[in-house]
Amino acid sequence: MQIEERARNIALLILDVDGVLTDGGLYYDASGQVSKRFNVQDGLGIKMARSVGLECAVISGLESPAVASRARELGIAEYHPGHTNKVPIIRDICSRKNLDLAQVAYLGDDWVDASAMRLVGLPMAVANAQPEITALAAWVSKAPGGHGAAREAIAFILEAQGKYAALWEKWLRGS
Ligand SMILES: [Mg+2]
């Protein structure tokens, strides 16, 4: 199946955190607190996607208060931290939302994402993903993780679904 055809079916985009929504950097302060750097354009993309019926979920291998805050701020209802095996969570989300796996896209960067990417209808990788992950992906962003890769993935899906131009017109009008 053509990549655009696969993208047309997508109702849920699952995003990894470290290396996808962030550049993978972990900033430790003297007390051991970790902070991370997110991309504001990815954030707006996630809100835009939701406004036209493309939901974004976040599954992270790590537990992080910083990520929990960011997920809350972006209104991400499906935020699942602390899962290195992402497959059961994806299956659970799909069964709760009555989604077929063909309707799910997954954007990843590293080996922890491999089994999830093999499961879903549209596996996607960031530009600087590990080579094995790039090989599993049907689509690869031009931007690296944490630098607009998620926004680019969202734009690709919405473009394939014929929703992108109308969304832009709406913002251009300011309505
Ligand atoms: Mg990662």
Image: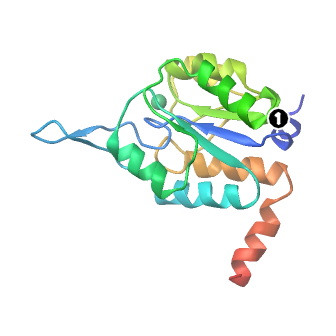
Which residue is at a point 68% across and 82% down the rendered structure image? 174
Instruction: Judge from the rendering whether residue 110 lies leftward or rightward of residue 66; answer left or right.
Output: right
Q: Quadrant of residue 49?
A: bottom right
Which residue is at a point 53% across and 51% down the rendered structure image? 148
Q: For label 1, count other residues whose C-alpha is less than 10 Å away and answer few (under 14), some (14-19) or many (20+).
A: few
Instruction: Judge from the rendering whether residue 46 lies leftward or rightward of residue 130; answer left or right.
Output: right
In this rendering, the answer to whether 42 lies above or below 169 is above
Q: Quadrant of the C terminus?
A: bottom right
Numbered disc total: 1
Residue where numbered disc 1 is placed: 3
Q: Quadrant of residue 67?
A: top left
In this rendering, the answer to whether 70 lies above or below 104 is below
Whether ligand 1 has any atom under 8 Å from the Cβ at mark 1 is answered as no
Q: Amino acid at mark 1?
A: Ile
Residue ranking furthest to the left = 30
In this rendering, the answer to whether 136 lies above or below 31 is above
Q: Nearer the viewer, residue 132 or 66?
A: 66
Q: What is the x, y in percent for residue 102? A: 81, 29
Q: What is the x, y in percent for residue 2? A: 88, 33
Residue ranking furthest to the front = 96
Give the secondary structure at mark 1: helix
Q: What is the x, y in percent for residue 173? A: 73, 83
Instruction: Judge from the rendering whether residue 163 lies leftward or rightward of residue 72; answer left or right.
Output: right
Q: What is the x, y in percent for residue 144? A: 51, 41
Q: Is residue 115 visible?
A: yes
Which residue is at a point 68% across and 49% down the rendered structure image? 154
Q: Quadrant of the N terminus?
A: top right
Which residue is at a point 70% across and 53% down the rendered structure image? 155
Q: Nearer the viewer, residue 132 or 42?
A: 42
